[in-house]
Image (spheres, rainbow, N blue to C red):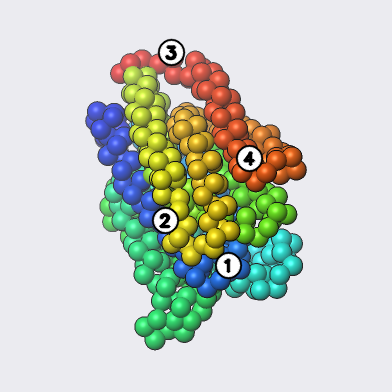
Amino acid sequence: MELTENKMGTAPVGRHLLTMSLPLMLSMLFEAFYNVVDSLFVSHVSEKALTAVSLAFPIQLLVVSVTVGTGVGINAILSRSLGEKNQKGVDSAAYNGIFLALLSYIVFLIFGLFLTRAYFTWQSNDPEIVQYGVDYLSICMVFSFGASGQIAFQRLLQSTGRTGLSMVSQLAGAIFNIIFDPILIFGLCGFPAMGTKGAAIATVAGQILALGIAVFFNLAKNKEIHFKFQRVRPSGKMIAEIYKIGIPAIIMQALNSVMAFGVNVILISISSTVVAAFGIYIKVQNFIFMPAFGVNNGVIAMTAYNYGAKNKRRIDETIKYGTIYAGTIMVIGIAIMHFLAAPILTVFDASAELMSIGIVAMRVISLSFIFVALTLIMQGVYNGLGNGMYSLIITLCRVVVILLPVLYIFTKLFTLNTVWRAFVLAEGGSAVVGAFLLKKIYKQKVANLANG
């Protein structure tokens, strides 16, 4: 059966990119919000509990990195297959993406069962922080099939332009977590007080709920994909295609986990309060970045579809409008970090020392946001055109070449207020590299296409 033309190839680009991105923005905003909620409620248990959850964050980010990175490959190939009217390619990308999500979960399960305590004792010799961390992270990892599965099935919805249904799935999980976090942490409504264990249980239960809803929507509403699981066979060729784009994206996302871990290791040499301040910043930063990631995902799908359809004009407009939308989000983010830093930290029950450190961190690091907007759109274009390696190069430049070495040197040479400027240097430098790579790939793959 021949596929019909998708709206990604016919609707006005600016409007349709916004229509696709808004549900993704909203769902990712809630995703970030319930990550913030974990830290917010845990901060009222104790500062050590907050430090433990902050130390756990790089591993949680790693789970998301592997699944989202694989999803980037699925998204690009599936959307491109839609543009080419290739039903077999659409179905194969979907089936093999689900298979890879299952394999990823098995690895996370092993970590959760056997390695969480070693992970925390490597970073802290405080037994209270270690126990809080083990209680929290082991539950998150053992039940991480919810996180892996929901992202995989939501990506299938996004790849066919059904971002609204993806949003409903994500919102349901987020709202569940937000409601049950305080109930299970503090022991409300007849439940026992479980501290960080309660935060973890609320998180994984919300993820499992989101997975169930995403599966239902795909089976009931996603007509471009023919779900006939009795015929499913892993395809080495399709897995290789997915990972050609996905592995650079996985490494790129995982480098963010390495960044968070490396920054924690560097900053804990100053004090655990500095780590707690950075942990709060990261959660608030994600609250701002997630809507921009929604635009990034829309750019991937629109670019991939119109590259498959060989339409240069629509790719150009996707780049233009994506930059405008992401830039607007980041300007708002800078304003939030500058003018609302103190109220945000007050919500986290910050001590005077934590307040002083956190305000400066938020205001200085947020100056890098405008560079982040440009980088996210460039990475969306690379992935949509099937070259995830360029996205990886940008992230390697930001994290390994600039941020961690400069941050370490700054901690040895300057005061803490200056140390935060390493983040601005890293984002600015990677944006310059990204602009060079965008010019190169545009000349290779887009410049000679027809205008539709």
Number of the front mark, 1 or 2: 2
Q: Secondary structure at mark 2?
A: helix
Expressed as whole percent of the image width and height from the top left, the position of residue 204 reads 47, 67
Give the residue at mark 3. 448
> Which mark sits nearer the N-terminus, 1 or 2?
1
Question: Residue at position x 51%, y 67% from top?
Answer: 43
Q: Mark 2 packing: few (<14 Cα in 10 Å), some, or many (20+)?
A: few
Q: CA distance from mark 2 to mark 4?
A: 23 Å
Q: Mark 1 packing: few (<14 Cα in 10 Å), some, or many (20+)?
A: many
User: In the visual, does 22 lie left or right of 150?
Assistant: left
Number of the front mark, 2 or 3: 2
Q: Secondary structure at mark 4?
A: helix
Give the residue at mark 1. 47
> Which mark sits nearer the N-terminus, 2 or 4?
2
Q: Mark 4 packing: few (<14 Cα in 10 Å), some, or many (20+)?
A: some
> Which mark sits nearer the N-terminus, 4 or 1?
1
Q: Quadrant of residue 50?
A: bottom right
Q: Secondary structure at mark 1?
A: helix
Frontmost residue, 234 versus 18: 18
User: In the visual, does 77 lie left or right of 46?
Assistant: left
The quadrant of the picture occupied by the N terminus is top left
Q: Which mark is residue 370?
A: none
User: In the visual, does 290 lie left or right of 234?
Assistant: left
Q: Quadrant of residue 244?
A: top right
> Which mark sits nearer the N-terminus, 3 or 1?
1
Q: CA distance from mark 2 to mark 3?
A: 52 Å
Labels 4 and 1 touching (C-beta < 8 A): no
313 to 386, vertically: above or below: above
